[in-house]
Structure formats: structure tokens, C-alpha cells
Image: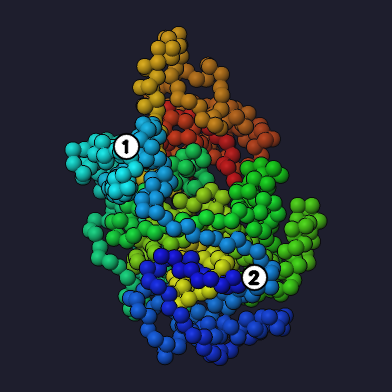
């Protein structure tokens, strides 16, 4: 159950806990903290409350909790929790004085079977509920691994059993869906050895790997005291398939503690295959929608393999504002901003706040931790709402700590949390129930893939900023753990309830999640290649189904006979470029024609060999066009894109080996154009 206690002026952590809450009496404790001269009496009041709450967790005379010891309980001593609870009190007071008007999220209880029905819809398998023979659902089912298929079957079994109990209507038997003679479907399992991300095993070819260190993205002293052993991450085999033995119920050992002095995290390297790495923004929106379907199935299978229940909230929220800056849903805010800046991915106000802090606040001591003036922040909030879109707001008047306060306020006032209310319990569970950092990272990776596009892009911009804050630790005195403890309550607390003991004990859990997000963000925003493999298979299955359907259409068959001399090509996706017929003739095996609409030389036939990389093709075009480059392409970073065939659109890694990509998708077109920002 999700902990909820009525109190209109307080806050709550949205963590799932199976036990009832226990109330803790407030107790006084004194600890010393310097109060900046600019602090108001409200800030000093906040410090007193911080001390009282901090005492709640550290008081040894308090009765022990009735539930088993978890990671968040054994996490931090009272001193290191100080920043977290001071931030909680600051949030509470900003809401009590009326400066924030966050929407109260209300949870709707689920009827028996409803959760499974929603899950099937969310993974793109509504066809199993409706009984319709939809091609997209069939294509998705045809790509599932053994563990993924088992996860789907388990949810569908629960759903059908519930319907039979209610005697609502006849439902399809699971054996009819999976085409088996018993309740245990047989599937072709994913090979244990790595396979290319296109889902095709090339005969006689051994995978070639290039290691990509996650430390290259955050070289800011986070490896102090880190283990000498480097762990390797592979994207070639699904995470759930790589779990060989079902583990026992896992909890953190009792001596496991998140202390500031031992907060170093493991160093991971990522296997970079011959297909390179793919970032979230490198795929088309249509393919990313399929990635989200597959990620939820894979996350469910992953939790099943670990013996952990995947919990999701069912929240019904009050509709947010439709205009303004703060308290507006991200999608609506982006729609409004995109009228001014087409293609925008992160709200303008959020970008401006980040830019302000990056330009002047990264070296400010205690940035994010030291609060600004509550009255100034409130006035700036109102002034921004009135003047931001008129470009009359004076940013020079904004102090760094006030800008940080506005940034955190923007995140807190979102009608739905940045990491979505549905999956907040899954974020908590991955730390409380999974002890190994590598497995935590894999679960977190899939959760990031599940986020709506607007949430994921905004979260990425925020985490990139936090990485810069930590990189300036020498001047701003904010290390990874400090930043994580301050940011956590802003991401995982929402308005409406009073914090109870279990929610307090989840504080270090949420802080640990934030530091994983900051530390490994470049890994987390890379699409696992096994998911791309499944998307390719889905697209191929959908195309094959469409072709078979077309063969039964007499009208289409007559049309095809009239066009027998034309080359058969798949439907051109959005973003594809149209070229004259003489450029579309058949091309010999191993030769691709690359188009560059913004170059003076718009096309070139290139013979591929086993060592040709995407960056080699880009360099060749650059050399050919260096003297007469188009004005349109100056100052733009050009990338090679794979368009059509079994992928919608795919911006290729410069290190991708083109012969491998070509063999994976021989029907594709190859276009050089700017990478989507």
C-alpha cells in the first residue's frame, strides 16, 4: 500500500511500503549549523524543525520498527541526514506561506484484475484484452524473449482468471495466444553469447567490442577510494535473460551504510559493439514508443527473475494549469513553448534557470543547499509569470541561491512528478529490494526508458546541470552525496501528507537513487541494443504482415503488376528524402548511396568494407565539399542517419561499422543531415 496521512500543509515521500506507518514523537536535538546573514527568521525556524526531525531518526530510545531492516534504514547517521531534512522543511514552509500551489495527487484503488489490464494496455498488448487480431500486437509478441514472454503470460493469466471469477465474458485462452499445447509456452531463447544489436547473427563473424568508460562523463573526484575492479555492462542480451539463477529475497546487509566518506560508486564500462551506441534522441518517436513497450515488459521480467514485485501507482490527478510557467504539465508547457521555438525538447523557463545557474552559480558555495530568501523567491516567481514571455524580466537581479530555489520550485510544482507517479514505487523498490549496484543500475536504466519523452528530456537537462555542480565541488563545497540529499526530496516528495517514520527512513534510499542518476547518466540515456534489436524485429514482422495482407487484395495486385519494373520499397517514414529516379536504381551488394541534401555534392556511392565506419563516410563528404560547403550546413554538426527498412530513423554512432549496419538493414536509405538537438 502507499502511505497516506491527511495533513494539508505537509509533505510525503511517494514510496511503497507493505506495512502500516508508525508515528514518531518529535524530540529536540541541538546541532550547530552556520546561518548565513541573509537568512530570515523563517529560515531559523526551519533549522529548529530540522534538528527536531533529525533527532527523530537518530534517537536510540525510540522503539525499533516492527518491520525488517532495509537499505534505507541502515543508510545514514543523523549528521549526514541533516541536509535532506532541512530541505524537506524548506519545502514545507514554502507551501505553508502560499508561495507554491502544487496539485494534490490522489490515488485510486484498483479493482481486482484492473492492474493487469492496465499493464497489458501500457505494453501495447490491448489486443489481448479486446480479442482483436491487431498486427502491432502480433509483431510485438513475436519478438519477446523467454523471460519477457513468461512475464506477459503471467499477467494475462491473472487477468483472465479474474474475469472468469467475475463471469464477465469469455476470454481467450493463453495457449491460443502463444500457440502452445500447455500453459508453459516454448520460445526460442536469446543466446547467452552476445549477438549484434540488429537481431541477426552474422555467420563466421566474431563480435568486436570497444569499451566506453562511464567515468569519461563525470571526472570530478567521484572515484576517490573506488574499487580497483571495473565491472562490465553488456547491452547485447536482455537483462532478465542474463539472470541465471533465481536469487533469494535480497535486502541490504545490516552493516551496509551510505556514509559520505565511503560514497564512491563502482566504475562501469559499456561494451560498444560494431553497431555503436544509440542515445535516446537518436531514434524516431515511433520507434521510441516501441522501446517503451518493450522496456516495461523487460522491467517486469527483470523484477520477476529477481523475485521482486513490481509495484505501480494508479494516480488520478487534478488537472493542472494550461498556461503560465509553474504548475503547468510538461507536455502543455512544451506545446506552448514550441509555438515560439519549433522542436524544443526542454521548457524555456527551465532552460533559462539552468543557464543562469551555469553562468554564475556553479562556484557559489552551498549552491542548491543554502536557501534563498523566501520572500524574494516568491516575488521573483510572480514576476516571472508576468514578464517571462514578454522578454522584460531582468535576470541580472536574480541571486544564485534564489535561482536555485526557483529551479527546485519548478520541479516540485509539476502536476505529476518528473519521474511519474506511476513508477515512483519501482524506483524505491530497486534500492530497497536489490542489493547489487549493477542490478540496481539495470533496473534504473529500464525505468528511464519508460519515461514520457518530455519527462526524460527535462530530467536529462537537470542531471547534466547537477553533474556540473558536482564537478565544481572544490569551490562550491557540494559533493555527489550533498547534491543527492538536497535534490531527492524535490524529486520524490509531493504535497498533501505528513511524513511518517517509514517515509523518513526512505530518505537515504531516494538520495541513493539520485546519485545513481547523476553518476551514471550517460549510461542511463543510452538505449540498450537488445531493445533496438527487438524494435527491428517488430518492424520487420509488421512489414511482412502488411505484405501478406496486400497479396490478398486484388486491386493492389493489379496495381503491382503495372509497376513490375519499379523497385519495391517500404513506406517512406517521416524525415526521408525524395530523390530523382536515376538515383534510386538498384545498387550492387556492399555499396550504399549516401545522400547529403545540404552539401553541394548531394549523393555519393560508397563501397563498404569491414572497417568502414560512419565517421569515415562523413569525413569523405566533408573533404569533397570543403571548398563549396552550403551556407545551410555551416556551424551544424552533421551525422549519418539510417532511414527506413526495419527502423524508422536512426542517427548512427560515428564508430558504427557500416557494413554490419547495412547487412542488418539493406532496405535503408543513408542520409547525412544535422543531428536532432
- The answer to whether any part of residue 34 appears in the image is yes
x and y percentages locating residue 258 in the rendered image: 42, 76
Give the SS element for disc 2: helix
- The picture places residue 549, in percent across and down from the top left corner, at 38, 22
* Closer to the eye: label 2 or 1: 2
> How would you rate the neighbour count of disc 2 (Cα within 10 Å): few for under 14, some for 14-19, many for 20 or more?
some
- First in sequence, mark 2 or 1: give its number: 2
Q: Residue at x 53, y 90 (%)?
A: 29
Q: CA distance from mark 2 to mark 1?
A: 50 Å
Q: Which residue is mark 1?
A: 142
Q: Depth check: give the residue in front, 323 or 600.
A: 323
Which disc number belongs to residue 423? none
Task: Give the residue number, with chain letter if any, for mark 2.
Answer: 95
Coordinates of residue 1 in the picture (x, y in percent): 41, 65
Image quadrant in which you'd find residue 663: top left
Q: In the picture shown, does residue 24 fall above or below 503? A: below
Q: Residue at 65% of width from left, 83% of height from top?
A: 45
User: In this orientation, does residue 358 appear?
Assistant: no
Number of residue marks: 2
Q: Position of residue 605 (x, y in %)?
A: 49, 26
Say which quarter of the image contains residue 17.
bottom left
Q: Residue at x 79, y 53 (%)?
A: 391
Residue name at image x 36 percent, y 74 percent = 70
Residue 486 in the image: above or below residue 460: below
Badge 1: how crowded within 10 Å, few (<14), some, or many (20+)? some
Amino acid at each position: 500500500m502507499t502511505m497516506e496521512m491527511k495533513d494539508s500543509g505537509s509533505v510525503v515521500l511517494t514510496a511503497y511500503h507493505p506495512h502500516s506507518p508508525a508515528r514518531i514523537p518529535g524530540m529536540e536535538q541541538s546541532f550547530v549549523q552556520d546561518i548565513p546573514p541573509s537568512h530570515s527568521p523563517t529560515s531559523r525556524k526551519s533549522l529548529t524543525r530540522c534538528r527536531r526531525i533529525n533527532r527523530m531518526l537518530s534517537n536510540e530510545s525510540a522503539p525499533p520498527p516492527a518491520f525488517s531492516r532495509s537499505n534505507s534504514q541502515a543508510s545514514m547517521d543523523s549528521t549526514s541526514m541533516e541536509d535532506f531534512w532541512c530541505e524537506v522543511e524548506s519545502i514545507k514552509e514554502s507551501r505553508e506561506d502560499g508561495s507554491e500551489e502544487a496539485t494534490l495527487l490522489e490515488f485510486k484503488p484498483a479493482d481486482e484484475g484492473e492492474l493487469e489490464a492496465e499493464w497489458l494496455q501500457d505494453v501495447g498488448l490491448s489486443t489481448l484484452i479486446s480479442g482483436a487480431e491487431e498486427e502491432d500486437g502480433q509483431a510485438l509478441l513475436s519478438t519477446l524473449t523467454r523471460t519477457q514472454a513468461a512475464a506477459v503470460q503471467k499477467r494475462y493469466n491473472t487477468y483472465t482468471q479474474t474475469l472468469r471469477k467475475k463471469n464477465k465474458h469469455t476470454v481467450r485462452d493463453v495457449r491460443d495466444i502463444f500457440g502452445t499445447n500447455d500453459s508453459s509456452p516454448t520460445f526460442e531463447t536469446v543466446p547467452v553469447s552476445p549477438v549484434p544489436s540488429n537481431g541477426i547473427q552474422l555467420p563466421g563473424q566474431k563480435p568486436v567490442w570497444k569499451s566506453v568508460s562511464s567515468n569519461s562523463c563525470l571526472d570530478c573526484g567521484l572515484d576517490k577510494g573506488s574499487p580497483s575492479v571495473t565491472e562490465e555492462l553488456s547491452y547485447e542480451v536482455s537483462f532478465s535473460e542474463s539472470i541465471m539463477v533465481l536469487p533469494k529475497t535480497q535486502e541490504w546487509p545490516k552493516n551496509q551504510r551510505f556514509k559520505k566518506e565511503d560514497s564512491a560508486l563502482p566504475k562501469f564500462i559499456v561494451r560498444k559493439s560494431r553497431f555503436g551506441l544509440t542515445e535516446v534522441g537518436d531514434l524516431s518517436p515511433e520507434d521510441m514508443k516501441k522501446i517503451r513497450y518493450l522496456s516495461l515488459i523487460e522491467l517486469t521480467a527483470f523484477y520477476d527473475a529477481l523475485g521482486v514485485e513490481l509495484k505501480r501507482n494508479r494516480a488520478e490527478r487534478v488537472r493542472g494549469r494550461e498556461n503560465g510557467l509553474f504548475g503547468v504539465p510538461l507536455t502543455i508547457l512544451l506545446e506552448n513553448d514550441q509555438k515560439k521555438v519549433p522542436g524544443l525538447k526542454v521548457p524555456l523557463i527551465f532552460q533559462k534557470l539552468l543557464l543562469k545557474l551555469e553562468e554564475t552559480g556553479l562556484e557559489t558555495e552551498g549552491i542548491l543547499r543554502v536557501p534563498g530568501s523566501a520572500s524574494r523567491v516568491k516575488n521573483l516567481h510572480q514576476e516571472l509569470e508576468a514578464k517571462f514571455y514578454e522578454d522584460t524580466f531582468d535576470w541580472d537581479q536574480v541571486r544564485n541561491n534564489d535561482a536555485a530555489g526557483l529551479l527546485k520550485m519548478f520541479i516540485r510544482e509539476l502536476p505529476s512528478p518528473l519521474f511519474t507517479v506511476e513508477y515512483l514505487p519501482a524506483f524505491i523498490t530497486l534500492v530497497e529490494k536489490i542489493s547489487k549496484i549493477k542490478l540496481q543500475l539495470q533496473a534504473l536504466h529500464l525505468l528511464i526508458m519508460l519515461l514520457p519523452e518530455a519527462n526524460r528530456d527535462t530530467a536529462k537537462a537537470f542531471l547534466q546541470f547537477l553533474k556540473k555542480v558536482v564537478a565544481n565541488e572544490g569551490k562550491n563545497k557540494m559533493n555527489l552525496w550533498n547534491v543527492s540529499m538536497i535534490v531527492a526530496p524535490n524529486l520524490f516528495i509531493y504535497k498533501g501528507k505528513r511524513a511518517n517514520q517509514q517515509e523518513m527512513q526512505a530518505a537515504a534510499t531516494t538520495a541513493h537513487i539520485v546519485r545513481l542518476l547523476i553518476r551514471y547518466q550517460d549510461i542511463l540515456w543510452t538505449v540498450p541494443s537488445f531493445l533496438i534489436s527487438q524494435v527491428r524485429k517488430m518492424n520487420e514482422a509488421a512489414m511482412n504482415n502488411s505484405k501478406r495482407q496486400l497479396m490478398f487484395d486484388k486491386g493492389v495486385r493489379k496495381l503491382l503488376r503495372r509497376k513490375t519494373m519499379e523497385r519495391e520499397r517500404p513506406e517512406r517514414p517521416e524525415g526521408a528524402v525524395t530523390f530523382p529516379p536515376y538515383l534510386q536504381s538498384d545498387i550492387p551488394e556492399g555499396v550504399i548511396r549516401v545522400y547529403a541534401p545540404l552539401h553541394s555534392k548531394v549523393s555519393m556511392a560508397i563501397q563498404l568494407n569491414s572497417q568502414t565506419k560512419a565517421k569515415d563516410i562523413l569525413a569523405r563528404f566533408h573533404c569533397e565539399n570543403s571548398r563549396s560547403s552550403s551556407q545551410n550546413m555551416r556551424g551544424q554538426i552533421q551525422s549519418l542517419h539510417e532511414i527506413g527498412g526495419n527502423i524508422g530513423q536512426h542517427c548512427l554512432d560515428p564508430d558504427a561499422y557500416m557494413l554490419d549496419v547495412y547487412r542488418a538493414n539493406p532496405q535503408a536509405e543513408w542520409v547525412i543531415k544535422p543531428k536532432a538537438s
